[in-house]
Image (cartoon, grey):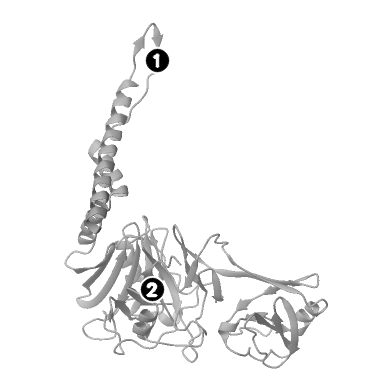
Amino acid sequence: MDTFYYAENYELRKLTEVLVNISVIGVLILCQVLMPIHASGVKVAKVSVPDFDVNFSKEKIMNEISPQVRQKNFDNLIKEKYPKAVIADVTDGVKHIKLTKYYNGRPVRINVVEIDFKLANNLEITPVLSSNSTLKSRKTISTIAKNNDAIVALNGTYFKPQSGVPLGTLMINKKMYTGPIYDRVALGIFDDGFDIARVQLNASIKGSGKTVKVDNINQPRMLSTHVLVYTPQWGKYSPAAPKYGVGLQVIDNKITKASANAVEIPPNGYVISGPKSILYALLDKKDVKLSLNTIPDWQGVKHIISGGPYLVKNGEVYVDMTAQKLGAIGGRNPRSTIGYTSDNNIILVAVDGREGSSIGMTLMELANFMQSIGCVGAINLDGGGSTVMYVNGKVVNNPQMKGGIPLSNAVVLTKIDKS
């Protein structure tokens, strides 16, 4: 049965190649026919035909439709892009690259995973939490990877060390888990590509003829005047309301309780916490509706993971560390980053540091490296002690703590769930 199936596919591929060749030849013939002619006294307009490289056009077409041609081109691309590196095949369309660069004569060990999704079309990249039930959790990268059947995993965005709650925007499968802080940059993952932008929350609660702005979701309170929403992933109870504030319990879009103390978060609802002067207006009719969106309005976005700062923006090195209030992460450190190329290859990078055999990178060095390997967009992820990369069942870099510290979240490469 397998042999028959392979034979069918082989014949189909050969037929496809023949049809492409015929199409290319047909275009050439048509171009020749449309050259200036005179027939029956009728003057046909002159058509300008551009130079046509038959071999290049055929190769380009075959690269798009033939897995064998694309795989060969991907192999060559990786060899050219990472000279003197140790390159290993992880699975179809996925390469693991180990290399060492030198800065002022001192070494930096780098692990790279590059993914061509036209070859790895049964795989997807997505952020995941260390726990399916709560934000307040931390696990090692190996545990997170194994729990998600991941082929590759890299530590994700910043998190609060004491609790594990992610600090910044995190959306998984179109569900918003945490909102942005300090207008920091985030990567948006779509079915057909990627985008990077500094993300803000565009959220509100409507009820009793009023619209109340929501300042954040499942994040630490910055100001007593902010209105925050806490979902079941936060935990069993919301924090106590701020001074002169109130917490409103919402079940099935209906306000069911108001208290200045910690309020139980219902599994089929949420808690709104903020100033009484703002929230009491919603108690008139008690029916409310929560709307969660982002600025920019990323229509169709499936996943969002924040980080910061920018490293590469529109193909140019761009490091806005001060603007994103990330001054504490300067200097030479272990680094983690995610970027994408013009043809939507994803690149994951882990840089070892703080040791004699690998001194780490500055943000500018990392940005220049990501640009040099073809990234048109890239952002910095949580680094330092958090930097850890997992490939095919094992940790492949050398984190400060063996196996890596327990993490709040990660970026993983997994098989597409078609259920």
Q: Secondary structure at mark 2?
A: strand
Q: Which residue is nearer to you in this view: 340 or 393?
A: 393
80 up-or-down from 101: above or below: above
- Locate residue 391: give its quadrant: bottom left
Instruction: Pick the residue in front: 250 or 170.
Output: 250
Q: Position of residue 142 (x, y in %)?
A: 34, 83
Is residue 325 toward the left or the right of residue 275 in the image?
A: left
Q: Which residue is mark 1?
A: 44
| Most foreground residue, 173 or 108 | 173
Residue under label 2: 412
Q: Quadrant of residue 88?
A: bottom left
Q: Is residue 281 found left or right of 160 in the rendered image? A: right
Side of 160 relative to 370 (left or right): right
Q: Position of residue 174 (x, y in %)?
A: 53, 68
Q: Residue furthest front?
A: 1
Looking at this view, name the residue that lies furthest to the top: 41
Density class for disc 1 (Cα within 10 Å; few <14, some 14-19, many ≥20) is few
* SS of the residue under disc 1: loop
How far is the residue under mark 2 from the one under mark 1? 60 Å
Q: Residue at x 26, y 49 (%)?
A: 8
Residue 232 is labelled as none
* Percent coordinates x, y for residue 67 in the rendering: 27, 53
**Amino acid of disc 2:** Val
- Estimate how packed mark 2 is, as few (under 14), some (14 to 19) or many (20 or more) residues with alpha carbons within 10 Å: many
Q: Earlier in the sequence, mark 2 or mark 1?
A: 1
Up the image or down, 191 lies above or below 357; here it is above
Q: Please give the name of the residue rendered at 24% of the width and 58% of the height, measured from the top-left corner.
A: 2
Q: Residue at x 65, y 70 (%)?
A: 203
Tell me which corner region of the image, top left, top right, bottom left or bottom right, holds residue 376.
Answer: bottom left
Which of label 2 and label 1 is nearer to you?
A: 2
Given the image, on which type of amino acid does mark 1 rest? Val
